[in-house]
Image (tube, rainbow, N blue to C red):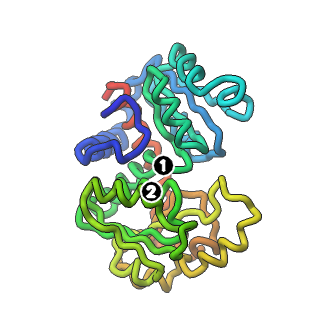
Amino acid sequence: MKKDLISIAQLTKQEILEIISLAEKIKKNPADYSTKLKDKTLLMIFEKPSLRTRISFEVGMTQMGGHAIYYDLANSPMGKKESVSDTAKTASRYVDIIMARLFSHQQIEELAEHATVPVINALTDFSHPCQILGDFLTIKEKKGRLENLKLTYLGDSNNNVTHSLIFGSAIVGLDIAIGCPADSKYLPQESVLAKSKELDGREIKITDDPIEAIKDADVVYTDSWMSYHIPESEKEKRLAALKHYQVTAELMKSAKPDAIFMHCLPAQRGVEQTAEVIDGPQSVVFDQAENRLHIQKAIMLKLLKAS
């Protein structure tokens, strides 16, 4: 692996499979890794709110013998009184590894460029690599493989999760279909589609027909329609535009009978999916959430060369 994990697109298929394999070992025998990061310190920089990201990284570091520092940018000079590059250089003198959950992808790239310790992207407006690596661990657990499966993503597709799913699927050999409105506000960015084609040469199926998108899917995935950066004033317009992409029990019937339902959370029942789906037998959303812990342990061990 490179020094940092900024985008899943930077990884090879072999690197992704190695991270997943290590996460499986950690999950099965956590005690074997309880001192792997003894006396190591993780700096956790947060600009966006978090539940799963903070808890999973902090618990993961603690369970491997290390220490995590929570740093809220609301009370920080970073990007205001102090440049991102100076923050990165200074923090690198104190800690062993940095993770950051930021609005701007450009800022995480700048942080990584100037830090001398590994930097992990824990979410930006463009990319969410840790989430998708955890998702792939979950799919492998439930389906036994990643290749020759169809993953369908429904809803707002111009976001970090969709972009990273597109990249990751291209690398590991998952077929992916996107169901969303035919409007640039909701479509994946062209640069993402171009990069994906470079990675595996295949066209991604994108349609505004949710039934066509979900047909014969092994995995059905959705995400919030109101990401953190979207103003509340746009809510009614977005709900109206996306309502046909709500994952319902009826829509799930067009997927394969053994299809699993995924959501990276937080979720709003009755919005992007119904309660019947997310709380139903096909839902794996809480297994998915748990796997963030195991995959992020593996990522930290790999970057710190402690596995």
Q: Which residue occupies 49% across, 86% down?
A: 250
Residue 250, relative to residue 91: is it above or below?
below
- Residue under pointer 1: 127
- Tell which of 83 and 299 is nearer to you: 83
- Point out residue 226 in the picture as x, y percentages from the top left corner: 64, 62
| Label 1: few (<14), some (14–19) or many (≥20) C-alpha neighbours in 10 Å | many
Residue 1, relative to residue 215: is it above or below?
above
Q: Are marks 2 and 1 in contact (CB under 8 Å)?
A: yes
Q: Which residue occupies 48% across, 56% down?
A: 161
- Point out residue 46 in the picture as x, y percentages from the top left corner: 62, 37
- Would residue 145 be seen by someone viewing this image from the given angle? no
- Tell which of 82 and 57 is nearer to you: 82
Q: Amino acid at mark 2?
A: His
- Point out residue 155 in the picture as x, y percentages from the top left corner: 53, 70
| Label 2: few (<14), some (14–19) or many (≥20) C-alpha neighbours in 10 Å | many
Count of numbered circles in the view: 2
Tell me: 238 left or right of 232: left
- Residue under pointer 2: 163
| Residue 43, label in figure | none
Q: Secondary structure at mark 1?
A: loop
Residue 102 quadrant: top right
Q: Amino acid at mark 1?
A: Ser
- Point out residue 133 in the picture as x, y percentages from the top left corner: 39, 49
**Quadrant (top left/top right/bottom left/bottom right) for the C terminus:** top left
- The answer for how far apart the CA atoms under marks 2 and 1 are is 6 Å
- Tell which of 115 and 276 is nearer to you: 115
- Would residue 203 be seen by someone viewing this image from the given angle? yes
Q: Secondary structure at mark 2?
A: helix
Which tag, 2 or 1, sits closer to the chain's start? Answer: 1
**Quadrant (top left/top right/bottom left/bottom right) for the N terminus:** top left
- The outermost residue toward the top is 93
